Image (tube, helix red, strand yellow):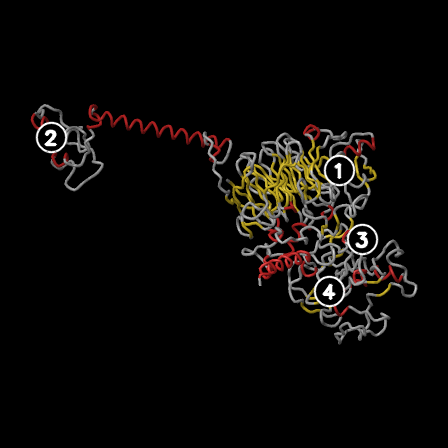
Amino acid sequence: MTSEDPRSLSPTPETDPRASEAPEPTAPAAPPPAEPFLRVEGVGPQAPAPEVLSFAVPDLSALAEPPADETRRRKLLAVLAVLLVALCGVVYLFVRYLNRPEPLPELLPVPVEVNYPPHFVFAFYDVNAPLGVALSPDGKRVYVTESEGDRLIKMFDTQGNLIRAFAPPRTTAAERAPVYIAVDARGRVFVSDRLQHAIFVFDAEGNYLDAILGPDLTLSEYIAKHTGQTPDPGAFAYDIFEPEVHYRTPDGDERTLPRPDAPTWAPLGVSFDPSGRLIVTDVAREQHRVLVFPAEVIAADDWTDFEPEVFAFGAFGEGEGQFQFPNKAVVDALGRFIVSDGNNGRLSVWSPEGEWLFVTGTGGGGAGLNLPRGLALDERQRLHVVDAVGQVVRVYDFASEEPAFLFTFGTMGSLKGQFNYPNDIAIDATGRLYITDRANDRVQVWSY
Amino acid sequence: MRWIRWMVPLLVVGLLVSLAGMAYANGGPHGGYTPTTDACAGCHRAHTAQGPNLLTAASTYELCMSCHGASATGADTNVADGVYTDRQGGGEGTVNAPLLGGGFVNYQSATVTSIHDVDGTQSAAWGFGVARGSTANLPGPLTCGSCHDPHGSNNYRIIREEIAGTTVTVDQVDESAKDYTVEQWPDNVTNACVACHGAYHVTRANSGEDNSDDGSGNADYGGDISTYAHRVDMSYQYGSNADPETTGYGGYTLPLTASKYVACQTCHLPHGTAATMTTLATGPNTGDSALLRLDNRGVCEVCHQK
């Protein structure tokens, strides 16, 4: 490449007097010039060299010259280093999000307390007046109860595609009323049934396993004690409207037994606390209360000797330490029981020992509840309360001793993000919220 | 004039106290309001209402069903399935006993065959200011609130004291003895029905006789397709009739009022019924069970036992 080459970065005759002073006559013939990458009128191989050299070739010699530009070079390197670190951080967050999706503030290495309402994502509709909702332990299955139509329990994937529908065996739609639903750490599905006065238990795929007929009675236990044989899981059925229970012997014979005595409870809300205890709200006539079943009994494979030491608290009424149709109870990180006291329009908070502490969510303003139903705590101890008549979800901070109202989301209506008698809520580890929207016949999905 | 300074506030306080005392103490959120009650916001919005009467929803039916639906998440009276979900009366009472009014979706574990359609559509009532056998539109859509007063009334079943513009008097049953599954009807319980179905309020003696002129002060709409109609508000005793309430027939019974009178509700369930009609009993409206309590014409046989 010679000085005639327009792409040359060598000193030009004009800028370097040495070039004009001593041209080398014995220099080998230059090869034909290559096609210039940019042809300008009057500039090119045929143009005189000075004109070619006057073409705006930037003088980058300063970069190569250390003394005066060393500082600049170092600054540039520093900037590049910072950019490299930032790129690594973004790649780290991206990879971590792929492995475990979480809201952005929770992905950051330094905790950032940002309280902003979630946004509506989408809704799925293959449900009839849905009431209860719960998630499988891995968050990949959504279980929903229906209160109209066939009154089934439906299992969806997280995109709202129906996987399977199931119901207690030997019951018709008119004989069952599934309401609230909870999933234990093993993936078993617990469904309260208001007409049957029972909690039906299914495996993760919806196969019927057993029924809890009272605080100290299961159907498998009833059959085992009356037959002397341990029945196979699910090989029996109960319907409160029928005079007999049906069971299948190990030999495969169908037999019946007289139905157990009328139930003494009316289970409504069901949930699990982090330690695996089953928490049930009981709305039996004028004895409204909360029942806590020990984890070790509930987690057992065999319930044919079902004698849990159930811990209970609460009474019927409007006063302190009383409930009117408690719909659901959850346990916060401080071990407190938080109960949605439906017809009293408030949240009732109890100590881990079952001592009444205080109520909250009363009065006017955004914090005031109308008809609280479903509850769910997220990992930051934000309590989400579904207000069925208020047609919103109200969110409170329960991370400290004294809870505080944070915000409300949703409005009344049938458009996207609007509610028409919502009832229950479930939250997954990624900050996705599933909310049953009863009178709109859909489940809404929101996200932080 | 100095006395006016304290008399006026005293009168205001007295008025408030007297008004507070007028609030009915029916069950749940249906009464017992105080001057600073928070109950209003449970169902109403002053500035952001979505339906008539400042309701939080466009549908009265859905509002009622949020407590009284099949899930019964806020009440034991499940009017969708027509059952009282708990032990009525406590103790050893029956679980899931049938409600006095029947059901709107199911009744006694079967799908209903006729209902009072209270989903808010415009409805026509048989005999509403017209001759028997004819219908006329009601003043407004039929809803739960057409017959029940959600704010409470002078009877525990919160039946309105005015229905379709007609004053309705239904005597109170002792509040402490209220029961949603065992009839405790006052003799004037029929008034709740005839506010709309006035042409059927035949009270003249001798049902089988010409009663086009009621003679008892009740409206005679004239032009009836039939001058003969079964009387109500009368004793069940006629000829060899059995007591339908205690004796019945073939295991079936029918309820009477406190003085053993026959009321509309003796044969009909106001919410809905799952009775089935076959062949001769189907009538002109196939499948319509006309809110009758028993299959076909079982309600006739319980008394008359032919």
Q: Is residue B18 above or below residue A31?
A: below
**Tag of residue A13:** 2
The amino acid type found where label 2 is placed reads: Pro
The amino acid type found where label 3 is placed reads: Val
Q: Residues within 10 Å of mark 3 (few under 14, many from 20)?
A: some
In the image, are marks 4 and 2 on the same chain? no
Place residue B35 in its image quadrant: bottom right
From this viewpoint, is residue A163 visible? Answer: no
Q: CA distance from mark 3 to mark 4?
A: 22 Å
Place residue B193 in its image quadrant: bottom right
Q: CA distance from mark 3 to mark 2?
A: 117 Å
Q: Quadrant of the N terminus of chain A?
A: top left
Q: CA distance from mark 1 to mark 4?
A: 44 Å
Residue annotated with mark 3: B182
x and y percentages locating residue B43 in the rendered image? 61, 53
Residue furthest to the left in view is A21
Along the polypeptide, which appears first: circle 1 or circle 2? 2
Q: In what element is the residue under mark 1?
A: strand
In the image, are marks 1 and 2 on the same chain? yes
Residue furthest to the right in view is B240
Along the polypeptide, which appears first: circle 3 or circle 4? 4
Seen from the viewer's position, the closer of residues A71 and B86 is B86
From this viewpoint, is residue B97 visible? Answer: yes
Answer with left or right where residue B74 lies relative to residue A8: right
Q: State which mark lies toward you, 3 or 1.
A: 3
Residue annotated with mark 1: A213
Q: In what element is the residue under mark 2?
A: loop
Q: CA distance from mark 4 to mark 2?
A: 115 Å
